[in-house]
Amino acid sequence: MPTDPTAITARAEALHSDARQLAACADRLRHVETTLAAGGVAPPWLREAVNAYLTACTTAAADLDKAAARLWHYAEGAR
């Protein structure tokens, strides 16, 4: 791990950006699930798959945000 606070902060910002993209993906999947549920014609396996990907995106976004926060904290200590 580099000890340059600027490099550490840049990595944290990249992780945070990735987390935001995954959160946006989760929002789109949430809309898909709502649409499928309202239509009432989607097979159960499709809704289950959408929900699985929704959960994965939500979990990954939270994990990346947590990692970014820790890196920002580490960068502050390296200053």
Image (cartoon, helix red, strand yellow):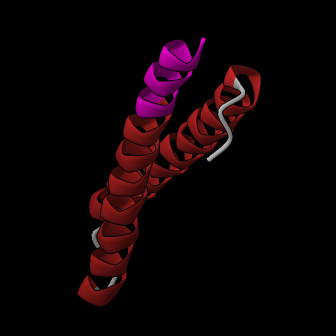
Does the magenta portion include 75?
Answer: yes
Does the magenta portion include 45?
Answer: no
The mark tally for this picture is: 0
Residue 5 appears in view = yes
Q: Specify the segment rendered in magenta.
A: 69-79
Q: Position of residue 72 (x, y in %)?
A: 51, 22
Q: Main secondary structure of the magenta part?
A: helix
What residue is at 27 percent from the left and 78 percent from the top? 48
Q: Is residue 32 above or below residue 72?
A: below
Q: Is residue 2 left or right of residue 76?
A: right
- Quarter holding residue 4: top right
Q: Is residue 46 left or right of residue 77?
A: left
What residue is at 36 percent from the left and 51 percent from the top? 58
Q: Position of residue 64 (x, y in %)?
A: 46, 45
What residue is at 53 percent from the left and 42 percent from the top? 19
Q: Is residue 66 left or right of residue 15?
A: left
In this rendered view, identify the residue nearer to me: 15 or 29.
15
Q: Is residue 32 above or below residue 12?
A: below
What residue is at 29 percent from the left and 88 percent from the top? 45
Q: Position of residue 68 (x, y in %)?
A: 50, 34
Q: Quadrant of the C terminus?
A: top right
Residue 36 appears in view = no
- Quarter holding residue 54: bottom left
- Quarter holding residue 52: bottom left
Q: Is residue 62 left or right of residue 1?
A: left
Q: Position of residue 3 (x, y in %)?
A: 65, 33
